Image: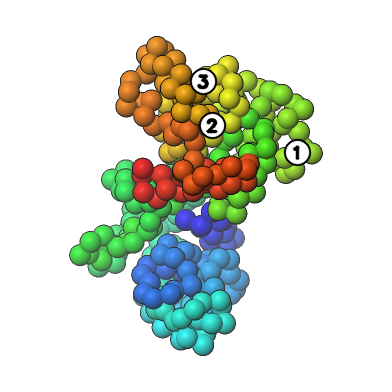
């Protein structure tokens, strides 16, 4: 799912308003297709749109097909070849091909399923929309697609006509420690799709002047983490160097499903951290989830370079699981 999109919700709103709606979803791509598999476009019965399946080069044709599909109450499977000239116009180096599934809400995509999908998204619950294009069956799965959920990857099941559209919650970044590295990390994280929050009881550090437009929590980290919650789409980064602040949050994280835990500090500092957590009863496997010293070893020296190394490591863990 595209980060922070409201495309299924908009389709449901149009349907509830009585003007009709269809969802168009990219199901396959070849070459330098403009949008990834799973990208969506909502089309109302009045021709309004939200989202994109191609960056603009085939949207017009998709809208025409969607309005016809709405009128007839039928599914459409479309294929478009994007020429080199059109691809260049939307910023691509070469052409590509995309396949798009168009589903009118109600007649093809059951209203109850779309409503449940939107409710799951609102509750930050990962969910997969599964469409069997041969049998016309539609359902939602909350389990059974672990690799797809982790990789945030929609697509057809192998050797089948069953399409799985992954709807993951938006990525979140929780940073403990309002230090210089955090000031560099947050703008980079936003660019890559994270919704960041900073935790630091020291209000002089965690101030709006230093972190404009960022939610700031001045509670002790363990209490703040409990308030925010940690799920499979959350990364926790600890930058204080202070065990009184870092350790309670780490303990919460090790008991959660957050996909990334990174802690600043030297190899010696991390060894002491490991010993403290072992004394607290955590297993070697649990402690092994912590990335410390934090970040990929790229020789980073400045706060900005360290932030790059942290974000790169978060990306590797998110996409490769290691």
Asked if 299 appears above or below 32 in the picture, the reply is above
Residue 303: name its quadrant. Answer: top right
What is the CA distance from the residue labelled 1 to the residue labelled 3? 25 Å
Q: Give coordinates of residue 108: x percent, y percent.
A: 38, 65
Front tag of 3 and 2: 2
- Between the residue at mark 2 and the residue at mark 1, the CA separation in whole angstroms equals 20 Å
Camera-side residue: 310 or 43? Answer: 310
Residue 288 sits in quarter: top left
Residue 203 appears left or right of 274: right
Residue at the spot x=62%, y=20% of the render? Answer: 220
Residue 264, label in figure: 2
Contact (Cβ within 8 Å) of mark 2 with mark 1: no
Q: Secondary structure at mark 1?
A: loop
Where is residue 102? Give x, y as percent: 42, 71
- Per the image, label 2 sits on a secondary structure element best described as loop
The part of the image, by quadrant, that contains residue 104 is: bottom left
Q: Nearer the viewer, mark 2 or mark 1?
A: 2
Give the residue at x 60% y 50%: 188
Q: Is disc 3 surrounded by few (<14), some (14 to 19) or many (20+) residues within 10 Å?
A: some
Camera-side residue of 154 and 310? 310
Determine contact: label 3, label 2, CB under 8 Å.
Answer: no
Q: Residues within 10 Å of mark 2 (few under 14, many from 20)?
A: many
Q: Which residue is mark 1?
A: 210
- The residue lying furthest to the right in this view is 209
Q: Which residue is mark 3?
A: 247
Give the spatial CA distance, label 3 vs label 2: 12 Å
Residue at 41% from the left image edge and 16% from the top image edge: 275
């Amino acid at each position: 799912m595209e980060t922070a999109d409201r495309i299924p919700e908009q389709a449901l709103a149009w349907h509830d308003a009585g003007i009709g709606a269809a969802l168009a979803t990219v199901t396959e791509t070849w070459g330098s297709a403009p949008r990834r598999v799973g990208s969506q476009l909502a089309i109302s019965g009045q021709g309004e749109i939200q989202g994109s399946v191609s960056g603009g080069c085939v949207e017009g044709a998709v809208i025409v097909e969607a309005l016809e599909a709405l009128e007839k109450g039928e599914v459409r499977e479309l294929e478009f070849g994007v020429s080199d000239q059109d691809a260049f116009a939307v910023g691509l180096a070469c052409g590509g091909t995309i396949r798009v599934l168009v589903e009118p809400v109600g007649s093809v995509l059951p209203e109850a399923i779309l409503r449940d999908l939107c409710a799951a998204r609102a509750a930050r619950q990962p969910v997969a929309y599964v469409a069997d294009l041969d049998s016309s069956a539609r359902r939602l799965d909350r389990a059974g697609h672990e690799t797809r959920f982790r990789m945030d990857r929609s697509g057809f099941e192998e050797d089948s006509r069953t399409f799985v559209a992954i709807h993951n919650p938006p990525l979140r970044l929780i940073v403990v420690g309002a230090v210089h590295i955090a000031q560099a990390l947050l703008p980079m994280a936003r660019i890559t799709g994270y919704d960041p929050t900073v935790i630091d009881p020291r209000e002089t550090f965690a101030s709006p002047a230093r972190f404009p437009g960022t939610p700031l929590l001045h509670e002790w980290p363990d209490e703040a983490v409990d308030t925010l919650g940690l799920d499979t789409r959350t990364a926790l980064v600890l930058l204080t160097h202070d065990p009184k602040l870092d350790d309670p949050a780490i303990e919460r994280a090790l008991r959660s499903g957050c996909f990334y835990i990174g802690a600043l500090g030297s190899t010696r500092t991390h060894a002491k951290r490991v010993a403290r957590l072992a004394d607290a009863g955590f297993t070697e496997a649990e402690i092994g989830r912590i990335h410390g010293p934090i970040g990929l070893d790229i020789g980073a020296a400045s706060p900005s370079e360290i932030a790059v190394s942290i974000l790169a490591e978060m990306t590797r863990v998110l996409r490769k699981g290691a």
